[in-house]
Structure formats: C-alpha cells, structure tokens
Image (tube, rainbow, N blue to C red):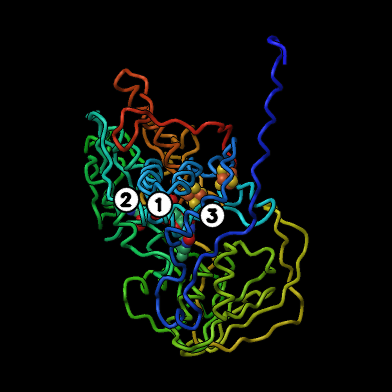
Amino acid sequence: MSADAVAPAPKPAPPPKLNPVRVPIAEEPVNARTGDFREVLHAYSKEDAILEAKRCIQCRRPWCVEACPITQDCREYIRLVASGDFDGAARVTLRENPLATCLCKVCYHYCEDACVVKKKGVPIAIRHLKRASLEYGNSELAYVPSKPKNQRVAVVGAGPAGLMMAWELGVRGYSVTVFEQERRYGGLMQTIPAYRMTDADVETDRKRFRNLDVTFVDGTKVGREFPFDKLIREDGYQAVFISIGTPSHRSLGVSGENLPGVLPALDFLKNVNRGVSVKVGKEVVVIGGGDVAMDSVRTALRESHGGRVTLVYRRSRQEMPADPEEVHGAEHEGIRFQFLKAPLRIAGTEKVEGLVVQAMELGPPDAGGRRTPVPVPGSEETIVCDTVIVAVGQKADLTGFGPELELKLTSQGWPEGKGKGFETAVPGIFAAGGRSVVYAMGAAMDAANAIDAYLSAKRGETAPARPDPLGTPANFHLPAGYTAPIRV
Ligand SMILES: Cc1cc2nc3c(=O)[nH]c(=O)nc-3n(C[C@H](O)[C@H](O)[C@H](O)COP(=O)(O)OP(=O)(O)OC[C@H]3O[C@@H](n4cnc5c(N)ncnc54)[C@H](O)[C@@H]3O)c2cc1C
Ligand code: SF4
Ligand code: SF4
C-alpha cells in the first residue's frame, strides 16, 4: 500500500442475534400450590438471571424504558445483571423505583410488551430480572433527602400513587404527611393474594423511606369528619395530593345480591390476606373478567379446599381484560371458564343456591373497541352454587371531596384533577391514580413535578432538577437514546 493510501473503512458490526427463547421461570407445581398460599413463581437463580440478561441486545433506542410509566432504566439494570454486577443492578432498580420489591412481583411489565425481542419470540424477562437484582444485589438502601425546603405537603391515601408522591417529594426535601384510612399501607395492593405478593413486600419498600421527612398516619379517613380543606386552612400544608383510588366495590344490581354466600371480591381478598375467617363453599362462582376476578377464582380455589370454582364472564375470552399471565395461572389450576354468560339474578331463599345466567353473543364494538355482549332470548340457565363472588369493578368514595375540586372520574373509577400535572380546580390541590400499580406511580410522578413547580414558585424559585434519591450529586436523567414515552 502507498504511504497516502486510505485504509478501507472497517465493516460495521453485524447486528446482534436475537435469542427468542426465554430462560424458563420456575413455578410451584400445581398440585402442591393450590392447597395454600405459597408463592407460585420462583425467582431466577443467579446463573439463570445472568443467562436471561445476556439475551438483551441493549437496543440503542430503549423501547422497554419508554414503555415503563416511571421510566425505570431497565436496559441498564439488565446490562449490569448480565455482567454479574447485582449490587449495581439493585442501585439502578431502586434509583427510579421506590416500590421495586412489589413491582418485581406484580407489575404488568409494559416494558416486556414493547421489547424488540417480542417480535421474534419471548421478550426479555425484565420484571424477573428486576427481582434478581434485588434478591442478589444489596437492596438494603435508604433514600437520601435533599436540603429541607421547609414546606409541607399532605397526601391523602397510601396506595401506590400516594407512596410514590411521598417518595418523590421526600427526596426533594419536602415535609410530607400521608393520611391513610386503613391500618395498613399499599392501597389495593393489600388485596393481591399472598401467592403473588404480601404486605411484607410493601413494608420492605417503605423501610427505604426511613431517612426522608415522611410521616405516615394510619386509621385516618380524610373527608367528612376530617375535612381535607382544613389541611390547608388550619394545618399549615401548602399543597395536597388526593390519591384515594377505588377502595369500594361495585355491585351487580341483580336480585339476591344480599343473600348470605354473596361476597364482594375486594372484601373477600382483603379478609383472606388478613387471616380473617371467610366462609367459602364447595361450588363457587366468580363473576367478572378482569384481574380482580382472576385473583378471586384462584383464592377461592385455595379457600374451598377441594371445591370447584367457575368463572362467569359476559364476553368471550378475547375480550377479557385480565392479564394473560393470570389467566394462564387460573387455567393451569383447573378453574372452569364459562364465557358469554351474563348474570340475571342470584337464586336462593335463606342462602345462595345458584346463579341464573343468560347466554350472550357478541355485537358491534363499543366505544372502547370491545365487542358488546347482546342477550340471546330464551337462553336462561342456572349454575348451581353455594358461593358467589362479585368482581365487576371498583369505585372511589368521594365523601367530603366537594364539587369545587371539579374532579374527573376515569372510566375505571379513580378521581383525577383536570389541570396540568393533575391539578384540580382549587390551586395547590392535585389528584391522581392509575389502572395498575406502575401507572398510578407514573401519574404521581407527573403530579410531583407539578407540585414541586407550584411550591418552588411560592418560594420565588424555579423547581430544581429532580435529584438522585440515592444521594449522589448526579441529577435524574433519561437514558441515552430515549425518545418519548410509549403507552402500552
Ligand atoms: C385484587 C387486585 C389485584 C390487582 N393486581 C394488580 C397487579 O397484579 N399488578 C398491578 O399493577 N396492579 C394490580 N391491581 C391494580 C392496582 O392495585 C391499582 O391500580 C393501584 O393500587 C391503584 O393505586 P392508587 O394509589 O391510585 O389507588 P389505591 O391502590 O386504591 O389506593 C388508594 C388508597 O387511599 C386510601 N383512601 C381512600 N379514601 C381515603 C380517605 N378519604 N382518607 C384516607 N385514605 C383514603 C385507600 O384506603 C387506599 O389505601 C390490582 C387491583 C386489585 C383490586
Ligand atoms: S416497573 Fe414494570 S413496566 Fe417498569 S420496567 Fe419494571 S416491570 Fe417493566
Ligand atoms: S427493548 Fe428488550 S432487547 Fe431492547 S434493551 Fe430493552 S430489554 Fe433489551
């Protein structure tokens, strides 16, 4: 080659090969698990976690992060797990995720739905790798508050949204008081059965708040006896976040609903979790097609000690909103499914004796895109049963939260402020929640930015950058290649 000849450009590296096959996640065998509430899904071993993490091709554009409502940098913790650095992975996990111990077990993993590997096979087990990071890395961390701001915020409701808000504002140096009507924290997560997660998981996460200026007040229902506007007028709070979620159950509105043997799903699940005796017979019918119905059928199976459990749903399997992982679990455990059947009334005189249903066929799609069930005339039948569990949705209890807030009720029932950052019509009062744990947290994250801006303005400042909750001088930043949030 002559002295001034140009060397040929190196060939671009071939794109990494996708391995479409997931390292299996071990499950407790069906015959062993349905007699009690032992955990169904097992954690990966360290070795399996590393193998699974190595399937990730570390996309330049992190689709997985964009699909996560709290922008958890899962691409980065996966990279660290693949290199065997579990402590590093735990730090990355906890940096953006104050409920990581809960979410590594129950998140509906929107990240996995967006993962590119899904185009060729099974997506990376992002949620299970989060769990591995906490199982094998140092997860005994405590969050570090920024310089005190000397401003107080009240949070009403200690579900995922309220806990996220307490963390977001606590690490920014605000003084936060969380009022909760129950004696336990976690909101609807308290109703999730112990074979998936427990109250202890909530407490593990909450323990990392210990150095923040966050006070938890349980057994206090804000509303009528304890008016929420008093928090600002008399108690010295400068902002309020209403995250009261949907603690009440919706009823069916059919006759026989007050008979002994009819149980609202939320009460049923909460009582079982708390060890309160719940009478479940040997022929149980659960009505509904969502995640609460799935948790109810599987819990009823365990509580019925050898009984038979049937799910009745008015649409077809394709329209069922429940998480496919939970439907698979229920099917695997022998739950009977009766699709395209709608309840007409609950039969019985002294107690439940049966559920009278009518067959349905699917008509045109409704506003939400799901096909509407249409009754088939003359198709009534009775499903003989001794217990009916009603899992047809939840609603908010707005007692004491007046019209001046102009709260909007979402289609799934939780109240929200209509303004930017979920501000209500009353300045300084914000309200939000969400359709899943991580969506509720994502909404609280947006509201926290708005509250920070509101309170900073009161101090005559602009809101500083979101700090690193683990106390390093670095501020929060989005991962390289991030473009925009994807809603899955
Ligand atoms: C059985 C079941 C299983 C589920 N499984 C999953 C799952 O696997 N994965 C997932 O991501 N999501 C799941 N969800 C949904 C998830 O739990 C909710 O989307 C999430 O909890 C909503 O959070 P939130 O903070 O908006 O409201 P909530 O969780 O409803 O919390 C609101 C809190 O406010 C309190 N409160 C209400 N009114 C007052 C008042 N006036 N004063 C003081 N406190 C008040 C309530 O007691 C409660 O603690 C499940 C829900 C149920 C019911
Ligand atoms: S929090 Fe949920 S959506 Fe976000 S990365 Fe973890 S598993 Fe995925
Ligand atoms: S989208 Fe999937 S493959 Fe790409 S970085 Fe995220 S987890 Fe890895």
The residue to which callout 1 is attached is 133
Between 113 and 153, the residue placed more toward the observer is 113
Label 2 sits on residue: 139
Q: Is residue 193 above or below residue 301?
A: above
Q: Residue at x 65, y 55 (%)?
A: 20
Residue 211 located left or right of residue 107: left
Residues at circles 1 and 2 in contact by the CB criterion of under 8 Å: yes
Closer to viewer: mark 2 or mark 3? 2
Amino acid type at image mark 3: Gln
Quarter of the image for residue 392 reads bottom right
Give the mark nearest the N terminus, 1 or 2: 1
Q: What residue type is disc 2 on?
A: Ser
SS of the residue at dot 2? loop
Question: In terms of secondary structure, where does tag 1 sit?
Answer: helix
Q: Residues within 10 Å of mark 1 (few under 14, many from 20)?
A: many
Percent across and percent down for residue 192 are: 42, 65
Element type at mark 3: loop
Closer to the N terminus: mark 3 or mark 1?
1
Q: Tell me: is circle 1 under 8 Å from ligand 2.
A: no
Query: Looking at the image, which is closer to me, 73 or 401?
Result: 73
Sort mark 3 into few (<14), some (14-19) or many (20+) by Cα contacts within 10 Å: some
Percent of width and height locating residue 47: 45, 58
Q: Residue at horizontal 23%, vertical 51%?
A: 217
Q: CA distance from mark 3 to mark 1?
A: 33 Å
In the image, which is nearer the foreground, mark 3 or mark 1?
1
Of residue 127 and residue 129, the one placed in the foreground of this image is 129
Which residue in the structure is indicated by mark 3?
Answer: 412
